Amino acid sequence: MKRRTKKGKLTHANNREEKAGYEKMKCPSDTKQSVLVLSALIALLGVYVIPLSAQLTLSEPHRRSVVYKMDEASLIVHNELLSENLTLSWLSDHCYQCLFQKLGAIPSGKGSGLPSSAAFFVSTQHPLTLQLNSTQDTRELCRVHFSFGEHGNYSLWIKNLSNLTQKITCPIVIDKEPINSYLPILIAFLVYAGVAILIAIGGFVMGQVFFFLILDPVKKIMYRMITTMETERLINSELGSSNQASESSSRDPTFPAHQEATSRLRSLDTFRGLSLVIMIFVNYGGGRYWFFRHESWNGLTVADLVFPWFVFIMGTSITLSLNSVLKRGYPRVKLFRKTVWRSVQLFLIGVIIINPKYCMGPLSWDSLRIPGVLQRLAFTYFIVAVLEILFFKARPEDITMFLIPELVLYWPAWIFIVALETMWLCLTFLLPVPDCPLGYLGPGGIGDFGHHPNCTGGAAGYIDRWLFGEKHIHQTPTSHVLYLSTMPYDPEGVLGSFNSIVMAFLGLQAGKILLYYKDLHMQIMARFLIWGFMLGGISAILTKCSRDQGFIPVNKNLWSFSYITTLSCFAFIVLLIIYYVVDVRRWWSGAPFFYPGMNSILVYIGHEVFQNYFPFKWKMLNSQSHAEHLAQNLLATSIWVFISYLLYSKKIFWKI
C-alpha cells in the first residue's frame, strides 16, 4: 500500500496586541529560576527519549528483515483457495464515504497444504477495513475490520471453512506484537509533570527557608534594637502612611490613578502563549503523531485548535488596547491609519518572510502563495479593529441597566457580523460551482464515493482558484493524504476569512466582558460560561453531535460556521479557567506560557524562519522513530520558550 505522505506545513499564528502597563509587571524570582531549571531538564529529555527509540524498534529480531516506517505494520496474506486469484483492497475508517483502494493481488493456492503468499505494508493510524475480491468476476469473498499496531507482524489466512458450503473465512493472526508507539508521549508527560512539581515544591521550600533563616532573624533583631514607636516612625518617614500615599499619587500626574486597571491581564497572555507553544510544537512535527497534525477534512485534532484561539484572543486584545486610547479622546482617524499600517505590515511579512519558496528567487512570483496565516490575521485584525473604532462606546456608569451590555451597546457591529455570516452561508450553499453539486462541502478525490473528485472545498475552493489562480494557493492540502484529492485548496482562503472575522469578534466580546465587569470576577466567569454553553449548543445543532453527519460539519479547511462556534466555545471555557487560576486566585503565574504570549509575533516568525536550522532540527539516528521526532520537537519548542523568557527579562517586545 502506498501511503507515504508529504510533509505538511502546519502554520498558525496570533497577532499580539500590546496594552499599556506591561512595564509595571515584574517577573517573580522563583519564576526566573523555574524557567532556567525547566529548560535544563527539558534538554535531558532528549537524552533519555532518543535511546528509547532504539529499544522500541530494534529489540525484535524481525526488525532486521522488515524495514518499517512510522505508522506501518506488515501484513502477509496466505491464500489457500486453489482456483481463486484475489485482489486485496483497503479502506480507512477515517475516510468518510470513500472508495476502496487496491492494495495488491494474491495468487491462488499452489496445492493442498501449500498456500500462496503476498506481503504488504498497512497503515496503523486508524482502523482499516480489508476487502478480498475475486480477480475474475470481482465478487466480494471476504471482508475484515481490524486495527493494526505500529511495527507489528500480521498474517491474514484465506481458507474454505467447508468444501461443501464454500464458505470462506479470513482470520488475522498476530505473528509479532506491535510496539507501544505512545510510550514516548507518556514518558514526556511524566518528565514535564515531574519538572513542574519539583519547581513548585522547590519554590515553596526555598521561600520558607528564606523567611525563617533570613527575614525572621532580621525582624527580631530590629525589634530588639529599636522600640515599636521608632519602628513605626521609620516606616512612616520612608514610605508614608496609606493616606499620604493615596494623596500624593492623586496629585502626581505621572502616577496611574488606577494601577490595577492599567496592569496587563496575565491570563490573556498565558492563553495566547499556550496556543503559541502548541502551534510551534505541531509545526515542528508533533512527534509525527496523527493527532498532532491537521485533520484530513471533517473533525478536530490538537493542531486544529491553536489558530482559531489566536484569532479569538486577538479580538480580546483589540478591545483592551483600543478602549483606553479611545476613552482619552484620541482621534479616530489617526487610529484608523495605524490600523491600516499594522495590517499592511502583517500582510507583507506573511507574503515575503513566511514564504516557503523564498530561496527560489525574488518572491518566486510564478508560484507564490498569496493567502496565508499572517495574511488572514492582517485582514481579520483590520475589519474587527475598524468595527471597534467606529462603534466604540465607553462603559456606562450603571452597567446593571443592561441585560447583555456587550450585545445591546454594540448592536451596529453585531448587525455587520450577522450580515457577514449570512453572506458566508449564501456563497457556500447557493453559489453555483461548475461540475459540482450546489452547497458541496466535501474533500473531493475518493470521498463521496468518487462522484466529485475535482470539487475540493466547493464554493470556497472555487472562489480562491478564480481569484488567485491555482498556482498561488496551497498546493498540498490535508485532503491529499487520505482522500487522494488532486485539486489545490487553501485553508486560509477568502471565504474562510469571513468566519475568521466572526471568531475574532467573539473574542472581542470576551474583552468587553472584562471591561464592563472589571473586578467583578463572578460576573465575568458567569458570562464566559454562558457564552461557552450558548456557542456549544449552536455547534451541537449544526453538527448533530457527529463528525460527518451534521448540517455543517466542523471543518478547519473550510473554517465552517460550526468550526468557529465549537472553537469559540472551547476558548471561552479555557479562558475562564486560566482567568480564575491566574488572575483571580493567583495560584499560577502563567509561566512558562506567559513569556511567549508577550512576544507572540516575534516568536512565531522566528520559529518559521529558523525551523530547519540547528538546534531546532538535526539529522536523526532513526528518522522513522516517533520517540526521536518527539524529543526533537519538544526540545525545539522548549528552546523558543526559553528565548521568549530571555526577551521578557530584557524587556524586549516586538510590536508591529
Image (cartoon, helix red, strand yellow):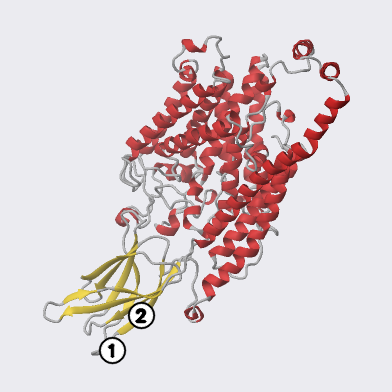
- The label number, if any, that marks residue 114 in the structure image: 1
Residue 600 locus on image (x, y percent): 65, 40
- Compare residues 236 and 377 and report the one nearer the observer: 236
Residue 366 against residue 257 in the figure, above or below: below
- Compare residues 573 and 15 and report the one nearer the observer: 573
Residue 593 locus on image (x, y percent): 62, 42
Quadrant the C terminus occupies? top right
| Quarter of the figure with residue 133 | bottom left
Residue 437 against residue 401 in the figure, above or below: below
Residue 80 locus on image (x, y percent): 25, 83
Q: CA distance from mark 2 to mark 1?
A: 13 Å
- The amino acid pointed to by label 2 is Ala
Q: Which residue is mark 2?
A: 118
Residue at point 14%, 82% (across, down)? 163
Compared across the picture, whether 151 is left or right of 220 comes to left
- Compare residues 496 and 38 and report the one nearer the observer: 38
Q: Secondary structure at mark 2?
A: strand
Residue at point 44%, 21% (across, down)? 415
- The amino acid pointed to by label 1 is Leu
Farthest-out residue, left? 164
Residue at point 42%, 38% (across, down)? 566
Count of numbered labels shown in the rendering: 2
Circle 1 packing at 10 Å, graded few (<14), some (14-19), many (20+), is: few
Farthest-out residue, front? 224
